[in-house]
Amino acid sequence: MVAKSGLVRLVILGVALLAAGNGYAQDELRKTFFKDADAAKAAAESVNAKLYAPKSWENGMKEYRSAEDLLQRGRNIDYVRSNAADAVRHFGTAAEAARLARTALAQAIKSRQDGANAQAPKLAPELWSEAQQEFIRAIRLMERGDLKNAKRRENEAINLYREAELVAIKAQYLSETRRLLADADRARVGKYAPITLGKAKRLLADADRELNENRYDTDLPRNLAIQANYEAKHALYLSEIVRQVRDKDLTAEQLVLAWEQPMRAVAGVADVVPNMQEGPDRLLAELIAYFEQQANELQALQQEKAENEVRLADMEEEMRALDERLGGATAERAALVQRLEAQARVKQQFIQVEKIFSSYEARVFREGNSIILRLVGLNFDSGNAQIKPNNFDLLAKVEKAIDVFPRSELTIEGHTDSHGGDDLNQKLSQERAESVQQYMINAMRIPTYRLIATGYGETRPVSSNETEAGRARNRRIDIVIKPNLEPT
């Protein structure tokens, strides 16, 4: 019995070794006969031949799978070699056809990608499906060498892709607004708040028109849609209030008192007496003045904190280095003292410059040792870079500020809001910066070597581009003054 059991184990071991040997042999044969086929397949995949040359790709895959099947079943090696060679040929044809299609159908491919980026497959599925069908037809015609009909199908695909893209973009930005306006119409808001509802509808129409005219600059239509949403919701709120007043559920006096209450709460936080005996104007002015003062004080504290941190770090580093060295310590300490004195001088000059401008003309602040003049009162006509005569008085004050820092380097930075194309905004900001630079050269007699004009377009906003006030702050000229810290 024991002998019989041992014999069984030997047989099993022999079968296992034979199978392992056959597996190893198959692996070696695959490496030999599929080397070129694998390389050709990878090359075809790299140009997405499955999409751009589907017939040749499928022929290649058919021969490739047949070769694998023949090898797996241990069939004649010549058959394996033949099928693998046919696969190489078809994959090569597919790769070449795919490269040609990607060049010839480049516009359709770009339109397809733009639509995909806008989520058209999800937001405009029917149009997307039609476009895909035309695109596939164009690819098949290209593969058959029918260039004329392929281009015709491509044009139809491009139009469908673009239409699907536009529908998707509008769905992203305008669908919520349309839903809100539909709710407002069902609630008969137009009867009670016609002005606000009409404004919401006009804003929606403006956003729709902007997307039709330039779908790729979505900043403006998005802002218009956001405003339309706000006005639609506001109209719903106002209609309910007006309905209560008309139904005598709320008196006019109760309404006014209710609206005064939030201002009283804000006044309490600001420690301002909420005097509204003649209306809210006086209290509103006091609150604005209070918050402007708070903002200015916060900015000053932040600047002072940053300056102190930099100064402390510099002094610690300098003192550490001086303590490590004995020679020349006196001279180096003297240089450190001079630099600290220069920084103190710049701080005094900064205070002097701050007093030159009103809050409506310029914001003056520091970044390190540099002084920034944010010319909030310097305005240009839309799309124009010409300095207007009513800005000459402000620029005269800029000249006085620059004179406080003799031998300083000056950078004129132009900035825009996000409305308009990126390239146009970049060009406009550069032209405005150069216009101010030329004015400084001609009117202020500042040497050219002290001036640099740089346009940043919409890339460096200081406020939200979602509101008109924020966009107005982003449309600006900043004068960066880099003082000369060398001892005079």
Image (tube, helix red, strand yellow):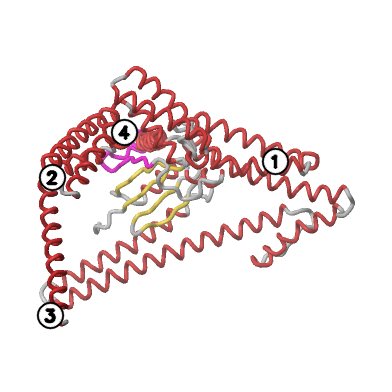
Question: Magenta stretch: residue 176 in it?
Answer: no
Which span is picked out in magenta?
441-456
Question: Magenta stretch: residue 450 in it?
Answer: yes
The first of marks 1 and 3 along the sequence is 3
Q: Where's residue 329, x and y in %?
A: 15, 74
Report which residue position mark 2 lands on: 35
Q: CA distance from mark 4 to mark 1?
A: 47 Å
Q: Nearer the viewer, residue 240 or 135?
A: 135
The first of marks 4 and 2 along the sequence is 2
Q: SS for tag 4? A: helix
Residue 182 numbered tag: 1
Q: In the displayed image of the protein, which residue is found farthest to the top?
A: 148
Q: Quadrant of residue 115?
A: top left
Task: Answer few, some or many: residues within 10 Å of disc 2's Cα (few below 14, many 20 plus, some between 14 and 19).
Answer: few
| Residue sitting at x 40%, y 45% | 459
Q: Nearer the viewer, residue 142 or 117?
A: 142
| Residue sitting at x 20%, y 46% | 68
Report which residue position mark 4 lands on: 54
Q: Report the mark closest to the observer, 1 or 2.
A: 2
Contact, CB < 8 Å: mark 1 with mark 2? no
Contact, CB < 8 Å: mark 1 with mark 3? no
* Residue type highlighted by circle 1: Ala
